[in-house]
Image (cartoon, rainbow, N blue to C red):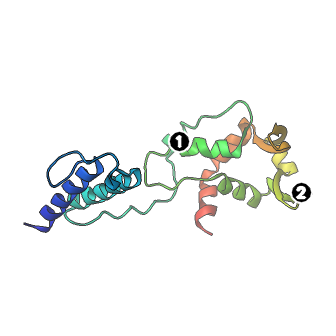
Amino acid sequence: MTELEKIAYAKSFIDKLANGISPLDDTSIKEDDIVNNIRLSRCFFFVSDILRQVIENGGIKQKKNKRSKFELSEEQLSKFAYSDLPIPISEIAKRLNLLITDETMKKISHRDLTNWLISIGLLKEISSLDGKTAKRPTEQGEAMGILTEQRTGQQGTYTVVIYDRAAQSFIIDNLDAVIALKYNK
């Protein structure tokens, strides 16, 4: 019996245990048996999946692919869903990440976008009364379409920075600069 055959044989045992079947005689294992514990069953399914990967890869467990840096083609960027209503930077990042077609690509975060906006002087960090820092548009940022809005949540009233259509376009048009700042740190 080859190593792969041994692994496949062991996997068949694990599969049966995960499904509450005795691998020795193919009978159902009693409900109150420790093997039918949900945690053990999940563990068996997990191990079974690893063994499946090993078998599919000729005896080697597949390593996770290193995630590639964030980048979008002009065609992908042309599909960005602009909002006519001002939206928060987290929504802009979310909409950019929806354009990713490569599962191994890193996502862009709202921090990446705000760090770039700070670096070019459209946002600034201010200290609030409670000692926390917040981001606010500079005069240039306001002229570009970066606005603030008061909202009310469970913790009370707070200020959110939002981006109108022109500000959204500016970010998308300069995404290469955002990416350059993100990866050249």
Reading the chain from its start, which is encountered first: label 2 or label 1?
Answer: 1
Q: Is residue 68 left or right of residue 179?
A: left
Please tell me in which quadrant of the rendered image residue 142 appears: top right
> Where in the figure is residue 135, as x and y percent of width and height?
80, 54
Find residue 128 and name its label.
Answer: 2
In this view, the residue farthest toward the top is 84
Alpha-carbon distance for marks 2 and 1?
33 Å
Q: Amino acid at mark 2?
A: Ser
Measuring 50% from the left and 41% from the top, which residue is drawn there?
76
User: Where is the N terminus found, in terms of image quarters?
Assistant: bottom left
Q: Is residue 120 left or right of residue 54?
A: right
Who is closer to the viewer here, 166 or 9? 9
Who is closer to the viewer here, 115 or 54? 54
> Where in the figure is residue 184, as x and y percent of width and height?
60, 68
> Where in the figure is residue 27, as x and y percent of width and height?
18, 46
Measuring 57% from the left and 44% from the top, which residue is drawn there?
96
Q: Is residue 33 left or right of residue 73?
A: left
In this view, the residue farthest toward the left is 1
Few, some or many residues within 10 Å of mark 1 (<14, 14–19, 20+): some
> Where in the figure is residue 51, as x and y percent of width and height?
26, 59
User: Where is the C terminus found, in terms of image quarters?
Assistant: bottom right
Q: Is residue 173 above or below residue 6?
A: above
| Residue labelled with disc 1 | 98
